[in-house]
Amino acid sequence: MRTPEQIQEIVRLLLEEYPEAGCTLDWGKDYELLFSVRLAAQCTDERVNQVTPALFERFPTLQAFAEADVEEVEKYVHSCGFFRAKARDIVACSQVLLEKYNGELPRTMEELTALPGVGRKTANLILGDVFRVPGSTVVDTHCIRLTNRMGLVDDLKDPVKIEMELRKILPPEKSSDFCHCLVLHGRAVCDARKPDCEACCVKHLCRHFSG
């Protein structure tokens, strides 16, 4: 594990390196982000952003999604992979949001993760990006890889365990933005196969670089 001072500096430097870090999915309405994240499972954000304009135009309201034929939704999201499960979850989730929450997204982890197709990663993203809840910590593949490499966690692979460890050490008000920074840094510098350590702004603080 890094020291508290090292962790603070890693957070500061990455936030400085990626000052505009945010969710790379395109969305306008709150529920559109929720559905986009569901579509992004085992798919790229780039692909999802290509699919959602037509999807949201065809189903412009939550009511339209709730009344949609699942097979028609499948046609719009087919290229995102696992399209049957994703289409089913989107329609079912729309129905629950209307019936139970008057069309609004719930604001707690427990309520969000009870929605069809919503896990902790998605719930944390909604809590952080929509409601700006401090401590929201999105653990995706980039976060898992980089936090282990840097030494923010000690050889953990389970997303929930990593989330709990990061909640202990990250400044709550910066944790959501920091996780977005990890995604951008993972794509641009800290690649899964061949990290470009020489180009890394936190290499002097990284366990992987220092050995």
Image (tube, helix red, strand yellow):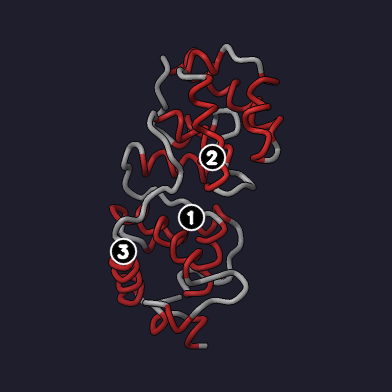
Q: Nearer the viewer, residue 61 or 205?
A: 61
**Residue 41 at what x, y percent from top left?**
61, 44
**Residue 129 at what x, y percent from top left?**
36, 42
The residue singled out by tag 2 in the image is: 50
- Identify the amino acid type marked 3: Leu
| Label placed on residue 15 | 3
In this rendering, the label closer to the viewer, 2 or 3: 2
User: Label 2, label 3: how many angstroms apart (C-alpha)?
Assistant: 28 Å
Q: Earlier in the sequence, mark 1 or mark 3?
A: 3
Residue at 41% x, 14% y is 102
Q: Nearer the viewer, residue 61 or 108?
A: 61
Q: Secondary structure at mark 2?
A: helix
Q: Secondary structure at mark 3?
A: helix
Q: Report the residue that reaches farthest toward the bottom.
A: 211
Q: Is residue 153 left or right of residue 9?
A: right
Residue at 59% x, 21% y is 91
Relative to 148, say whether 90 is above or below: above
**Location of residue 128 by image quarter:** top left
- Identify the amino acid type marked 2: Gln
The residue singled out by tag 1 in the image is: 163
User: Label 2, label 1: how many angstroms apart (C-alpha)?
Assistant: 30 Å
> Mark 2 and 3 residues: CB-CB less than 8 Å, in contact?
no
- Identify the amino acid type marked 1: Glu
Q: Secondary structure at mark 1?
A: helix
User: Label 1, label 3: how many angstroms apart (C-alpha)?
Assistant: 19 Å
User: Badge 1, how many Cα within 10 Å: few under 14, some, many 20+?
Assistant: many
Q: Nearer the viewer, residue 177 or 191?
A: 191
Q: Earlier in the sequence, mark 2 or mark 1?
A: 2
> Mark 2 and 1 residues: CB-CB less than 8 Å, in contact?
no
